[in-house]
């Protein structure tokens, strides 16, 4: 498919970025594990795991788009299934965000943790339906969805890291002197 060949460099860059960012998320999770915030077991699957899922989706899309498919139909079916799975996953995540009590999400959280990823997965599903008739436009949709998932993942990774550093770490530092004093009085 000659149209897909024009996207080669794009998916090498985007896929490499997604793979590297997955690795960095593991480093961040290791650092967070040293001083886990309260109720991290409740909030982690809702706010941290989807970031890995989004980065992994971008990595998978990048790999799928480099496979030498005979035509666009099986490729579109694969990214369409990913889009459908992502839609279902984002509905589950949005419901979990609403039910959890570890953190009160603000508009920015809803935007970056639910709405924008949902939009990206919807774009993938719609692009799959349109691929047979408008291959070039569908590929732009997949490229846009990939970038949206990548940037949402970057935002969410930064947001969770900043929250841990500036809120939870600062809170732990304020609590340490009082706890240290209690230990020495015994």
Image (cartoon, helix red, strand yellow):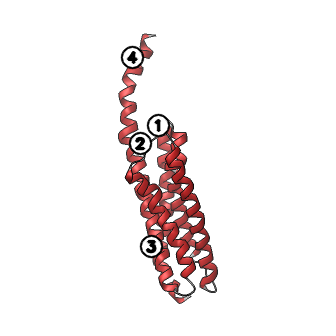
Q: Nearer the viewer, mark 2 or mark 4?
A: 2
* Circle 3 residue: 144
Query: Which of the marked residues, 2 or 1, is nearer the chain's N terminus?
Result: 1
Q: Are marks 4 and 3 in contact (CB under 8 Å)?
A: no
Residue 118: x %, y % from top left: 49, 63
**Disc on res. 114:** none
The answer to which quarter of the image holds residue 84 is: bottom right
Residue closest to the eye, 60 or 93: 93
For label 2, the crowd category at 10 Å Cα-Cα, with few meaning under 14, some 14 to 19 and many 20 or more, is some
Query: Which of the marked residues, 4 or 3, is nearer the chain's N terminus?
Result: 3
Residue 27: x %, y % from top left: 49, 49
* Circle 4 residue: 181
Residue at image position (51%, 40%) is 40
Residue at image position (49%, 37%) is 36
Residue 43: x %, y % from top left: 51, 43
Q: In 3D space, how far apart are the residues under numbered discs 2 and 3 (Cα atoms)?
A: 30 Å
Q: In 3D space, how far apart are the residues under numbered discs 2 and 4 (Cα atoms)?
A: 25 Å
**Disc on res. 37:** 1
Residue 104: x %, y % from top left: 43, 43
Q: In 3D space, how far apart are the residues under numbered discs 1 and 4 (Cα atoms)?
A: 22 Å
- 81 sits to left or right of 155: right
Q: Are marks 2 and 1 in contact (CB under 8 Å)?
A: yes
Residue closest to the eye, 13 or 166: 166
* Circle 2 residue: 164
For label 3, the crowd category at 10 Å Cα-Cα, with few meaning under 14, some 14 to 19 and many 20 or more, is some
Q: Nearer the viewer, mark 2 or mark 3?
A: 3
Q: Is residue 131 above or below residue 43?
A: below
């Amino acid at each position: 498919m000659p149209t897909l060949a024009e996207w080669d460099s794009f998916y090498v860059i985007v896929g490499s970025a997604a793979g590297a960012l997955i690795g960095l998320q593991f480093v961040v999770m290791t650092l967070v594990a040293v001083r886990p915030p309260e109720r991290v077991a409740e909030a982690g699957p809702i706010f941290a795991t989807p970031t890995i899922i989004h980065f992994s989706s971008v990595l998978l899309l990048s790999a799928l788009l480099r496979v030498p498919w005979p035509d666009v139909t099986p490729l579109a079916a694969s990214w369409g299934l990913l889009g459908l799975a992502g839609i279902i996953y984002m509905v589950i995540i949005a419901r979990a965000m609403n039910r959890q009590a570890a953190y009160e999400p603000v508009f920015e959280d809803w935007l970056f943790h639910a709405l924008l990823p949902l939009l990206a997965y919807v774009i993938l599903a719609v692009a799959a339906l349109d691929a047979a008739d408008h291959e070039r436009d569908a590929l732009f949709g997949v490229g846009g969805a990939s970038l949206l998932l990548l940037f949402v993942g970057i935002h969410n990774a930064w947001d969770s890291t900043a929250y841990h550093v500036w809120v939870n770490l600062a809170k732990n530092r304020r609590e340490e002197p009082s706890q240290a004093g209690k230990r020495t009085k015994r």
